[in-house]
Image (cartoon, rainbow, N blue to C red):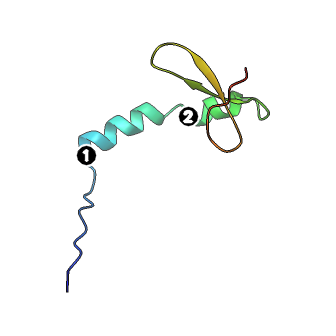
Amino acid sequence: MFEIHSRRAELAPSVAALLALFHEDTPQKLALAPDDSPAILHHADGTLSQVGEDGWPTAGP
């Protein structure tokens, strides 16, 4: 039989601090965001795509 060992490790304190700093204004951003706005995907080449209900980019604007 094989034994499965978890490789999940706790975050380093420095990484946890960076994540906390990065996300500290998330509640304010979410409070300002319209509820009915479409999800937008920003591609590396600068183009934008609307995201459909299935989570995949759609062809239309």
Residue that lies at the very extreme toward the top in this rendered image: 46
Where residue 29 sits: x, y (%)? 62, 29
Q: Is residue 4 left or right of residue 61?
A: left
Q: Could you say whether the residue bearing mark 1 is in a helix, strand or loop?
A: helix
Check disc 2 and report the residue beneath it: 26
Q: Can you say whether 45 is above or below 17 in the image? A: above
Where residue 60 sits: x, y (%)? 73, 23
Q: Quadrant for the C terminus, please.
A: top right
How packed is label 2: few (under 14 Cα within 10 Å), some, or many (20 or more)? few
Where residue 55 sits: x, y (%)? 63, 41
Check disc 1 and report the residue beneath it: 13
Report which quarter residue 51 is drawn in: top right
Report which quarter residue 21 is drawn in: top left
Residue at position x 28%, y 40% from top?
15
Q: Can you say whether 8 is above or below 52 in the image? A: below
Q: Which mark is residue 21?
A: none
The amino acid marked with disc number 2 is: Thr
Residue at position x 71%, y 42% from top?
53
Residue that lies at the very extreme toward the bottom in this rendered image: 1
Q: Can you say whether 8 is above or below 43 in the image? A: below
Question: Disc 1, disc 2: CB below 8 Å?
Answer: no
- Between marks 1 and 2, how big is the CA–CA gap? 20 Å
Q: Quadrant for the N terminus, please.
A: bottom left
Residue 43 or 26: which is nearer the viewer? 43
Where residue 23 sits: x, y (%)? 47, 35
Residue at position x 23%, y 47% from top?
12
The amino acid marked with disc number 1 is: Pro
Report which quarter residue 31 is drawn in: top right
Residue 59 or 5: which is nearer the viewer? 59
Q: Could you say whether the residue bearing mark 2 is in a helix, strand or loop?
A: helix
How packed is label 1: few (under 14 Cα within 10 Å), some, or many (20 or more)? few
